[in-house]
Image: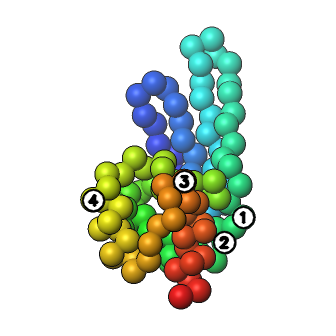
Amino acid sequence: MRQKKNPGNWKIHSHDQCGICSKPRTYKAKAMEKETRQFESAPRDRMEGLCIELAAILVAIGHPEAYITDESSLGDFALEPLEYALAEEELGIQFKSDHELLVDIAERLRSR
């Protein structure tokens, strides 16, 4: 398991597997009072088996490094209208709205 440190004394624990299909990640923060807080990821069950499609979507919207969950939507990325249009062209599909979930888009990609 890799461990990265960032300023602010946060430690991020992640899996070295596929960043899309890996198990849910847990985030721990060490506060100045030496108390530990734990944050858990939203579910990622629907993403299983859609790794290729989700990776294509993330590349098309210009965020291949993004950590996503079943609840991630296009609106999470604050894209400009031109960026939406370019991503739609690259993927060959039309997005329904910026609130459309990435897993729904991935399922549409797979079924076409």
Question: Horizontally, is 8 left or right of 71 in the view?
Answer: left
- For this rendering, which residue is in front, 101 or 23? 101
Disc 4 from disc 2: Cα separation:
30 Å
Residue where numbered disc 2 is placed: 48
Q: Tell me residue 112's x, y (percent).
A: 53, 88
Residue where numbered disc 4 is placed: 82
Disc 3 from disc 1: Cα separation:
19 Å
Residue where numbered disc 1 is placed: 45
Give the crowd class for mark 4: few <14, some 14-19, many >=20 residues within 10 Å. Answer: few
Among the two numbered marks 4 and 2 on one chain, the one whose residue lies closer to the N terminus: 2
Give the crowd class for mark 1: few <14, some 14-19, many >=20 residues within 10 Å. Answer: few
Give the crowd class for mark 2: few <14, some 14-19, many >=20 residues within 10 Å. Answer: few
Q: Nearer the viewer, mark 2 or mark 3?
A: 3
Q: Residue at x 53, y 36 (%)?
A: 11
The amino acid beneath tag 1 is Asp
Disc 2 from disc 3: Cα separation:
21 Å
Whether the residues at callouts 2 and 3 have beta carbons within 8 Å, the answer is no
- Residue 109 drawn above or below residue 38: below
- Residue 52 drawn above or below residue 96: below
